[in-house]
Amino acid sequence: GENVEQHPSTLSVQEGDSAVIKCTYSDSASNYFPWYKQELGKGPQLIIDIRSNVGEKKDQRIAVTLNKTAKHFSLHITETQPEDSAVYFCAASIRDTGFQKLVFGTGTRLLVSP
Amino acid sequence: DGGITQSPKYLFRKEGQNVTLSCEQNLNHDAMYWYRQDPGQGLRLIYYSQIVNDFQKGDIAEGYSVSREKKESFPLTVTSAQKNPTAFYLCASSSWETQYFGPGTRLLVL
């Protein structure tokens, strides 16, 4: 089955720096890759997603890149701010008996210091 | 205000007790999901439902049960057979591939 690996597990940056989180997936049939931000004690919130027919997608300070050949995708956050501190999860879609499900990475704890 | 609600926010279970976690959505989504989250791990799928009156086991269904009698509701019961129930439980719904999550329920064992 699909396996999603996420690195690093923790990431500390200074305010204003960039942060990059990387994920790899194993199932070449995966075609949808969302990223979620989870603040302490809350449910994950979708921040950006990308489909396999697109190589890059941007939304203000957040961007995601996808390399289908290498089966990896990355989240890029520029000009980081303290409120970006949270746990970030990547996910990849799998199709099971005609129904699309998500397999999640183990998360990256991002700490942005003022 | 559209969204997914979960209740209660905190739930305490005594040994041998069954407890039920509530999940309601007003997004008109067909599919609903239950995930378990443990520290340092990703989200693991417990059960999912594509339509009313139909549901399938996920990767860690043992010790859990669900029902889907209404489109808006997908309650999860943690049975006494689940020997390690302490975790953060998340409900989600989707209209196609994009899943949206509720605020979660933290289950603790007394």
Image: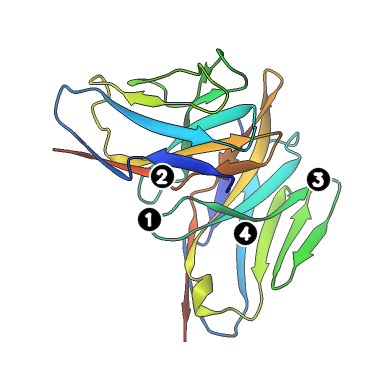
Q: Are marks 2 and 1 in contact (CB under 8 Å)?
A: yes
| Residue B104 image label | 2
Marks 3, 2: nearer the viewer: 2
User: Residue type at mark 2?
Assistant: Gly
Spatial separation of the CA atoms under disc 4 and disc 2: 26 Å
Residue B60 location (% of width, % of height): 42, 26
User: Residue type at mark 4?
Assistant: Lys
Q: Name the residue under label 3.
A: A52
Spatial separation of the CA atoms under disc 3 and disc 2: 30 Å
Q: How crowded is mark 3: few (under 14 residues within 10 Å), some or many (20 or more)?
A: some
Q: Name the residue under label 1.
A: A41
| Residue B50 image label | none
Spatial separation of the CA atoms under disc 1 and disc 3: 32 Å
User: Residue type at mark 3?
Assistant: Ser
Q: Tell me if A100 is positioned left or right of A112 in this view.
A: right
Marks 1, 3: nearer the viewer: 1
Q: Answer yes or no: are tags 4 and 2 on the same subunit.
A: no
Disc 1 is placed on an element classified as: loop
Q: Are marks 3 and 2 in contact (CB under 8 Å)?
A: no
